[in-house]
Image: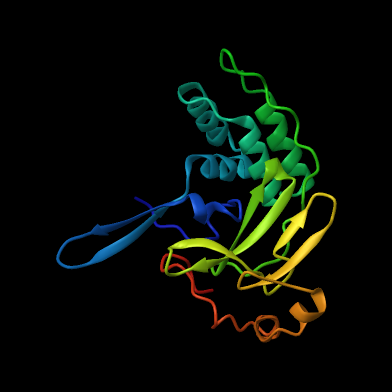
């Protein structure tokens, strides 16, 4: 098992919501928290590099367990790859054989832009096949990213450019949001008012 950090692979911003988290007890009393990204997110990270071994891995995975290419394409869009990387990744996906009974996924259309948001304390979710994005804060009690909130930008963005600002789930005008104490603190790097999962880096 190799230890990695958040700089090891390029993953969609929403990957923590699909990650598998396990507490593993080692020798003695030591306990390690193991966080594994979901399979589709790992595929996206390999598409970012797309070395020969990545191509072989993706093709082998697709043969054994056919990928939902529309989902992978949406995750690539969520990652915000540079144009050259995105085109290379989508071209490779388009060349994968379609499993019997499943149509080839349509090319990715321009979708909603993921707004800037704090890492770790918040997570962006691509919705409606990429037509909208919501940013949610970590809910410590529920153990989920489920509170609409973003101190660095809109919490909801639609494909047509419309957006909504929310703090702790409360809808605000942009002016009220701009003056909110949490927003002002976040602009200075102070996110102390937001909890984060114990498996994310404190960065």
Quadrant of the image occupied by residue 31: bottom left
- Coordinates of residue 12 in the picture (x, y in percent): 61, 51
Quadrant of the image occupied by residue 123: bottom right
Q: Residue furthest top?
A: 100
- Coordinates of residue 6 in the picture (x, y in percent): 52, 60
Task: Say left or right for 199 vs 124.
Answer: left
Image vertical order of residue 51 relative to residue 173, above or below? above
User: Which residue is more in the foreground, 28 or 200?
Assistant: 200
User: Which residue is more in the foreground, 132 or 22?
Assistant: 132
Task: Say left or right for 84 vs 3.
Answer: right
Q: Which residue lies furthest to the left in this view?
A: 28
- Coordinates of residue 147 in the picture (x, y in percent): 57, 65
Task: Say left or right for 30 vs 191.
Answer: left
Q: Which colour scheme is used?
A: rainbow
Image vertical order of residue 84 relative to residue 161, above or below? above
User: Which residue is more in the foreground, 143 or 23?
Assistant: 143
- Residue at the spot 58% in from the left edge and 80% down from the top edge: 191
């Amino acid at each position: 098992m190799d230890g990695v950090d958040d700089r090891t692979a390029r993953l969609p911003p929403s990957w923590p919501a699909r990650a598998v988290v396990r507490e593993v007890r080692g020798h003695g009393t030591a306990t390690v928290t193991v966080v594994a990204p979901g399979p589709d997110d790992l595929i996206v990270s390999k598409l970012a590099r797309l070395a020969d071994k990545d191509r072989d891995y993706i093709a082998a995975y697709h043969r054994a367990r056919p990928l939902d290419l529309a989902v992978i394409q949406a995750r690539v869009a969520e990652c915000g790859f540079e144009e050259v990387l995105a085109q290379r990744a989508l071209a490779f996906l388009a060349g994968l054989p379609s499993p019997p009974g499943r149509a080839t996924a349509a090319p990715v259309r321009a979708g909603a832009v993921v707004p800037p948001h704090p890492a770790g304390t918040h997570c962006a979710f691509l919705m409606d096949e990429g037509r909208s994005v919501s940013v949610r804060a970590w809910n410590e009690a529920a153990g989920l990213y489920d509170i609409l909130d973003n101190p660095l930008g809109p919490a909801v963005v639609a494909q047509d450019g419309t957006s909504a600002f929310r703090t702790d789930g409360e809808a605000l005008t942009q002016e009220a949001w701009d003056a909110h104490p949490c927003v002002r603190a976040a602009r200075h790097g102070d996110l102390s008012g937001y909890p984060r999962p114990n498996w994310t880096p404190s960065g």
